[in-house]
Amino acid sequence: MRLLLENKTAVITGAARGIGKAIAKRFAEEGCNIAFTDLNEENIKATEAELQALGVKVKGYLSNAADFTDVENTVKQIHADFGSIDVLVNNAGITRDTLMMRMTEKQWDDVITVNLKSAFNFIHAVVPIMARQRNGSIINMASVVGVSGNAGQANYSASKAGMIGLAKSIAKEMGSRNIRANCIAPGFIITDMTNQISEEARADWMKIIPLKRGGTPEDVADTALFLASDMSRYVTGQTIHCCGGMNC
């Protein structure tokens, strides 16, 4: 049986752990070659070795997704190393949560730069390659709070809402070149980040999720697989909520 991403190459940002790593692993299981970026060299090496065991070509790149020039150079190197770029997953992101009245300019700028500008940087670098191929799938990792907002997360919500608008615009600009752009909006996903939340707060989240559980990175990875593969060949400009019904 043919694998869903056989002989394709995906670029995944911030993929040395968490959701990004789960996406990289799921793609590799479907025959996809993986180029991924991160800022932690130790994590890059460990993830690289783990993914290579799945029998695909894998290379991790120490790269700052928020730095325009760094990204341009990294993408050029990835293209030289792999020969094509078929899928881009903009996953790199941070949080600096606090109420607006307490939020510093730096907390605002850091989140917007890492979460939103990094997506612009990679799309800007990758789109010319995909246009020449006349094929490509871009996936922005948004969030349910980018749709509904959330108290104490004005910076994060704004960055994720921006990623949704960015994907919709790219879908309209690049559709004639057979380049698709979509978003995934995860809800409460159990990761190192959410594990820092108190048990009481976690229990409160579960009460408002119809499926009565937190999501897993693998749940998000399966959604990304759909958007990366030809199963979604007529899907573009959309935001798929992976939230257990929390935002339905």
Image (tube, rainbow, N blue to C red):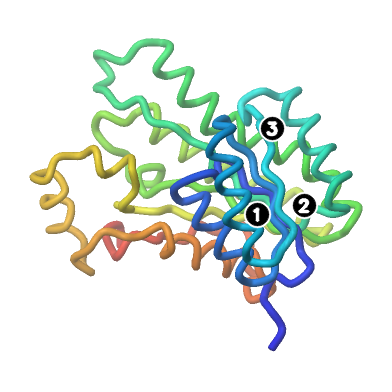
Q: Residue 7, image x and y in percent?
A: 79, 68
Considering only vertical position in the picture, is 207 above or below 70? below
- Cα–Cα span, label 1 and label 3: 15 Å
The numbered dot on residue 218 is none
Instruction: Look at the numbered discs 3 and 2 and tell me whether their residues touch, using CB distance below 8 Å.
Output: no
- Residue at x-position 8% and y-position 45%: 200
Give the labeled residue for mark 3. Answer: 121
- Cα–Cα span, label 2 and label 1: 9 Å
Q: Residue lying furthest bottom in this view?
A: 1
Does residue 163 appear in the picture of this structure?
Answer: no
Give the labeled residue for mark 1. Answer: 181
Q: Residue lying furthest left in this view?
A: 200
Q: Earlier in the sequence, mark 2 or mark 1?
A: 2
Which marked residue is nearer to the observer: mark 3 or mark 2?
A: 3
Quadrant hosting residue 153: top left
Q: Secondary structure at mark 1?
A: strand
Q: Earlier in the sequence, mark 3 or mark 2?
A: 3
Which marked residue is nearer to the observer: mark 1 or mark 3?
A: 3
Does residue 228 appear in the picture of this structure?
Answer: yes
Q: Residues within 10 Å of mark 1 (few under 14, many from 20)?
A: many
Considering only vertical position in the picture, is 80 above or below 96? below
